[in-house]
Image (cartoon, rainbow, N blue to C red):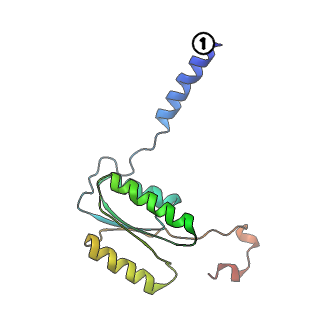
């Protein structure tokens, strides 16, 4: 049984190493660059914001403040980014409202400087197969 346990642990170590996230930009250094990531508090947007931060970019990200969890998630991402020693600007923003988007971008630029990278990630999910959705389901 001990041999099996050791073999399983060795296999898990090997799999863990092979499935470790690889740097999105290789060894690129993005210090001095500013990235805006919409929808940066969760999911793909969060992963992109974190990777850009690991590469040294300063990060401005927005999130939809739909509940207390959203704000908590955004604060956690901002904290993790700051731990990477990058500047962070975070703000709630509903990207369906162009005035909110303009305000977010203006404030981000004032806080962090010019923007070199834009990740337009924010989106919503619909809980239905696309072929079963009516046209009005696409209106948000």
Q: Position of residue 117 (x, y in %)?
A: 34, 67
Q: Please identify the quarter of the rendering in which residue 67 is found.
A: bottom right
Q: Position of residue 53 (x, y in %)?
A: 35, 56
User: Residue reaching furthest bottom?
Assistant: 99
Front position in the image: 82 or 126: 82
Residue 41 seen anywhere in this rendered image of the structure: no
User: Residue reaching furthest left?
Assistant: 32
Q: Please identify the quarter of the rendering in which residue 66 is found.
A: bottom right
How many residues crowd around disc 1 within 10 Å: few (fewer than 14), some, or many (20 or more)? Answer: few
Q: Secondary structure at mark 1?
A: helix
Q: Position of residue 4 (x, y in %)?
A: 63, 16
| Residue plotted at (61% across, 18% down) | 5
Residue 10 seen anywhere in this rendered image of the structure: yes
Residue receiving disc 1: 3
| Residue plotted at (63% across, 68% down) | 125
Q: Position of residue 112 (x, y in %)?
A: 27, 70
**Does 14 sit above or below residue 98?**
above
| Residue plotted at (27% across, 76% down) | 110
Q: Please identify the quarter of the rendering in which residue 87 is found.
A: bottom left
| Residue plotted at (70% across, 83% down) | 136
Q: Describe residue 25's horizontal placement relative to residue 20 as left or right.
A: left
Q: Quadrant of the N terminus?
A: top right
User: Residue reaching furthest right?
Assistant: 132
Front position in the image: 82 or 136: 82
**Does 2 sit above or below residue 20?**
above
Q: Describe residue 100's horizontal placement relative to residue 123 as left or right.
A: left
Q: Quadrant of the C terminus?
A: bottom right
**Does 94 sit above or below residue 51?**
below
């Amino acid at each position: 049984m001990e041999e099996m346990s050791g073999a399983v642990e060795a296999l898990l170590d090997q799999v863990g190493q092979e499935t470790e996230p690889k740097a999105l930009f290789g060894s690129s250094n993005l210090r001095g660059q500013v990235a805006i990531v919409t929808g940066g508090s969760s999911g793909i947007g969060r992963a992109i914001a974190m990777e850009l931060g690991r590469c040294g970019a300063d990060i401005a990200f927005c999130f939809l403040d739909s509940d207390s969890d959203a704000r908590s998630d955004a604060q956690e991402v901002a904290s993790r980014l700051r731990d990477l020693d990058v500047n962070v600007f975070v703000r709630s923003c509903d990207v369906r409202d162009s005035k909110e988007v303009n305000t977010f971008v203006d404030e981000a630029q004032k806080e962090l400087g010019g923007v070199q990278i834009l990740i337009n990630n924010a989106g919503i999910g619909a809980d239905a197969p696309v072929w079963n959705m009516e046209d009005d389901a696409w209106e948000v």
